[in-house]
Image: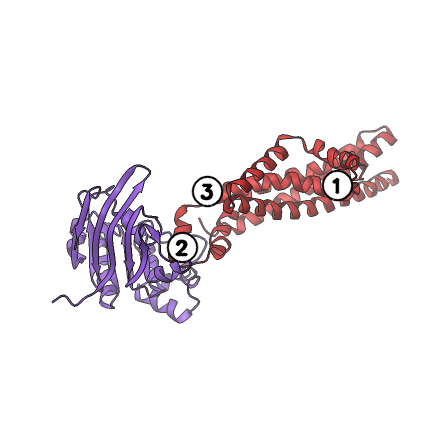
Amino acid sequence: MDTLSNIVEINNLTKKFGEKIIFKELSINFKEKEITVILGPSGIGKTTLLRCICGLETVSDGEITINNQPYIKFGEVVDKKNTQKVLNDVGLVFQDFNLFPHLTVYENIRIIVKDDKLVKYWLTELGMFEKKDLYPFELSGGQKQRVAIARALILKPKLLCFDEPTSNLDSSLKMNIASIIKKISKTGTSVIIITHDELFADAVADNIIKFTDLSTNVSCR
Amino acid sequence: MDYYLTLINQLFLGALVTLKFFILIGIVSLFFGLLVSILGLVSNSFIKRIINIYVLIMRGTPLLLQLITIYFGLPIIGLSLSRTVAVLIAFALNYSAYFSEIFRGGFESIDKGQFEAAFVLGMKKRDTYKKIVLPQVIKRVLPSISNEIITLVKDTSLIYVVGLGELLRMGKIASNRDASLVPLLFVGLIYLLIIYALTKLLKRWERSYGYFE
């Protein structure tokens, strides 16, 4: 018997850019406390789907429910005034990390939550406390990623999303990030990862959803 | 020797007037330029159109003409302004337009990812602009802003047209009085000194933003 509930439920989601259909009537459930990898070639719409879940894209039609809270219904945000409240449960680690270049590692996190103990905790957990006074341009790709992860985790999201987490990393660091993600998942945080890296997906995922063509109806439950 | 001391004293008074207007206009224009550019980013299309027309008029007509219109033209419709106020308004309107375009370019050059990162981290729009975007914009626009500031020092010489005794006017008066070009040579040297000092200050300001890339 399946006892885990869903952290994200997507029903009949359609997304268009102009006349171009990115995905049509897509229905997927993402189980909570698990690492779900969406695997597929570049350009198929995986990142767009992730961006819809994180509130960075509008949708044309359909529903998104996050942590049992309705976020989007009939293609519209349900409660525009409380959107942030729903999205607070979602964290995102961008493919390009998007660290704030004028702030040190420490400040990049402290600007979100002014709690020095918590900032120190997450930087230490991610092995970046010693680099806390450096600026992003002084960090390697792997180090930037760890800072981006710490920054996303500081808000204690129930769901942490990763957009192509291995694309800016040397192959030697890919398994390193896989073990960090598994460690995060063990704390009870649900994880959704977008990637085209099959080896990485196999190493890290509890579930893998393969996308080949999203422009026709896709249902993955 | 007495002649030169008297001349320098006269030119020094003119330089003080130049600097007074330069500082006042500079501060007001930078503030309004930033305000206009932010308004242009967050407003509806109607306000954006008004801003575009304003910038076109200010950049499309000579500053001297704008100054003459405000000081000599407005009294025709019953609005008389003092020379100081007329100069401040004309220059502020003109330079704010230039600064607003520089700031606009700066804002538009900021990667969309910075705004998105702030959004997913729950930052309010105001904090995003103030703490994340603006510091990066300032670093990018400083060279262009510095250029305009240096131009402003020299443009203040235009205020002679409303009879204010700034540096160049004082030099011309002395030159005509003494039938000599020496006063104008001194004027040139004083402008050079002012701009040299300003350039050093502006370079220091730019370097202060050099701690990040």
Above or below residue B96? Residue A29 is: below
Residue A29 x, y percent position in the rendering: 21, 57
Residue B34 x, y percent position in the rendering: 57, 47
Q: Is mark 1 on a helix, strand or loop?
A: helix
The one nearer the camera, B83 or A110, is B83
Residue with the mark numbered 3: B109
The amino acid type found where label 3 is placed reads Ser
Q: Is mark 3 on a helix, strand or loop?
A: helix
Above or below residue B169? Residue A78 is: below
Q: Residue furthest bottom?
A: A117
Residue with the mark numbered 2: B119
Q: Distance between the residues labelled 3 and 1?
A: 35 Å
Residue A167 can be seen in this image: no
Q: Do the residues labelled 1 and 2 touch (CB within 8 Å)?
A: no
Q: Distance between the residues labelled 2 and 3?
A: 18 Å
Residue with the mark numbered 1: B86
